[in-house]
Image (cartoon, helix red, strand yellow):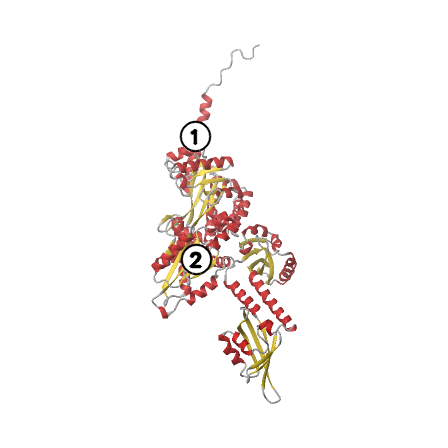
Amino acid sequence: MVAGDAAGDALRYLALLEAGGGLIWQADPDGRIRAVPTAGHVGRAAISLMQGHGWLTLFHPDDRFRFLLQAGRARRVGRAFEGRWRIGIPAGFWRWHRIRVVPLMNEDGRIHEWVGNALDIHERYLAEGRIAGSEARLRLALSAARMVAWEYDPEAGKSSRTDNSWTILGVAPDDFDGYIANMHPDDRAVFHAAYVKGGSMRVPELRYRHPDGRMLWLSSRGLERRDADGRRRIIGVTYDITDRKVAEEEIWRAANHDPLTGLPNRACFLASLNQHVGNDADCGSGVAIALLDYLDFRALDAALGHEGADALLRRTGVRLREKLGRDDIVARIGGDEFGVVLTDAVSAEEAVAVAQALTETLAEDIYQADHILTARVCVGLAWSTRSEAEGETLFRQAQTALHAAKQSARRGAASILLFDQELARGGARRVGMAAQIARALDAREIIPYYQPKIELDSGLVCGFEALARWRHPERGVLTPSVFGSAFDMPELARAIGREMARQVLDDLRGWIDAGLAAGPVALNLAAADFGEGGLAWTLPDMLAESAIPARYCAVEVTERVFLGEGGGAVAGALTYLDRAGIRIALDDFGTGYASLVHLKQFPVSEIKIDRSFIRDLETDAEDAAIVAALLGLARALSLDVTAEGVETEAQAAFLRDHHCEMAQGFLLGKPMGRDCASALLTRQALDRSISHRRKRVIDAETPGPVQPLLAGQG
């Protein structure tokens, strides 16, 4: 349970950081950045620039020295520091950020790591600047008679003001009735009440309609004095605070609205939600939450580019506002996730119908130069009667439903799910599975199974792919179809990767010592393996410790890893593996959004044609054409090719005829345990030895070429 909860907390924390647009980094004691979990407004493109001391280039030149000076002081005393500095973003301009950097100390009191967070406060900073400017203007107005000074006789109901009353208030200096008439009706009583009690009097703010139509915010202060005859006189000033009120509104809006779409943000969404639940006055009505998220948005982002993805999000906000009712609430929760509160959803069925209409509205085909992208949304729904609803509970239920809807949609099933107890039990099952996998790792029950990779021309084993299996003490050997949810939890995924690598290298060492030609054994890398301390960064050292040459090991990476959380770290890790001599294969090739782009961007040595193209190879001419084209592409790029999912002789023959070098599938060999893999390699070595001896015997018994009788004679 602890490992699962910690992993869940880490995911939620990173999601909150991603939603808040924060930049998070980790650095060595000397300030060299080594990891950037979230990029915030700086953008993923800048992550590579930040490595080492490259992050200094992101600071505004005028701020760089101030930051280094403060950082130096903090380093000397071992304390956190915080401030506001400008950071450049890919759009080409500077934005203000609040940056806080905290040292992590060793037991001996020395710094072993810095952790930093940069939160974009640009709009708020500018708004605060406008407030400061407004206050400065007020001081100038006071010194230059920008205020209206006045004297008021409360008993006679008369006043006199300075001549600039025309400019500021739009009424004559002695027109008290006109001044009162222009006040907002709700503020007149407040004004009169303030000047009845005597002493120091103040009306902090009141609304005033200027005769030219402008709505002003005014503030009024006065002090009472008595004439020689004892009559009350109130002397005071009235000044315009409209600029301050506008700036305050802008600050509130910056804190409660998303700058990209103009929609309310998560905090404002939850506050509005709480206002619409728990209302007993209309207990017969209901309220529903719909959380909408694009399926594989990172793939869309990679294909469309930053500006294209932003345009898609802006269109989403506009379409949601247009489609929903006037009283419904629309917000951008964070990233590509949007939230909707249906304030008068009579039933859950009605909420589902609205969600269906929204998915149809938001679905669109996006035409690229050489292909079409389909933007699809998944929806998680939660509904309750208004009197029984609790805002936070509904929101959590909708999040659970959204998570399940995205998993369902990736399997080709429903993309809209309404929260129910079955979904709740599914969430509980995921937590329970995490605990079981953590126990299985401790008990060394996670083991590798080896699926052979076969040379199609010779039929010989030329390598293996290591697949994770769970040797359950009661249920036998289980595949990831049972425990695959563990790979969604970074800590567990990294632990599984480390355990798989440890056992695979032990087996490799044994095969090498036995003189068996195992060929390269490929490990599948999950997204979590590319994070700090993940297998992608530790595998070369593990090989060195086991004295195994790098040529005996390979890694396989799917395109979903490139496009998922932490995808920005993949390029550096793959380059590191490639330089270490470890082969890199692009798995499930042809099923992603940007396969050709990845062949160009990453040091790929091999592509693995996805089984979905091989399955109908014999009957589907389009699949046959695609496979032939992929094989031709690989030859042109000097890449090795492995076809996955080969199950019939006809499929193998087609691939052989089209010069496909290697294949995997049940026809050629099912995944097997270590002992079976050892037996297979031993049998192959024996067959090779027998074949070699036979060839030597045949060569010895065969006469040499007949020499000419007159050889050597003139």
Name the quadrant containing residue 198.
Answer: bottom right
Residue drawn where x is 51% and y is 35% of the image: 636
* 44 displayed left or right of 142: left
Name the quadrant containing residue 349.
Answer: bottom left
- Residue 342: give x, y in percent of width and height: 40, 61
- Residue under label 2: 322
Q: In the image, what residue type sits under mark 1? A: Ile
- Residue under label 1: 690
Question: From where the camera sits, is residue 454 visible?
Answer: no
Instruction: State the residue lying farthest toward the bottom.
Output: 229
**Mark number, residue 172:** none
Q: In the image, what residue type sits under mark 2? A: Glu
User: CB atoms at circles 1 and 2 under 8 Å apart?
Assistant: no
- Residue 309: give x, y in percent of width and height: 50, 51
Question: From where the camera sits, is residue 415 visible?
Answer: yes
Look at the image and tell me in which quarter the C terminus lies.
Answer: top right
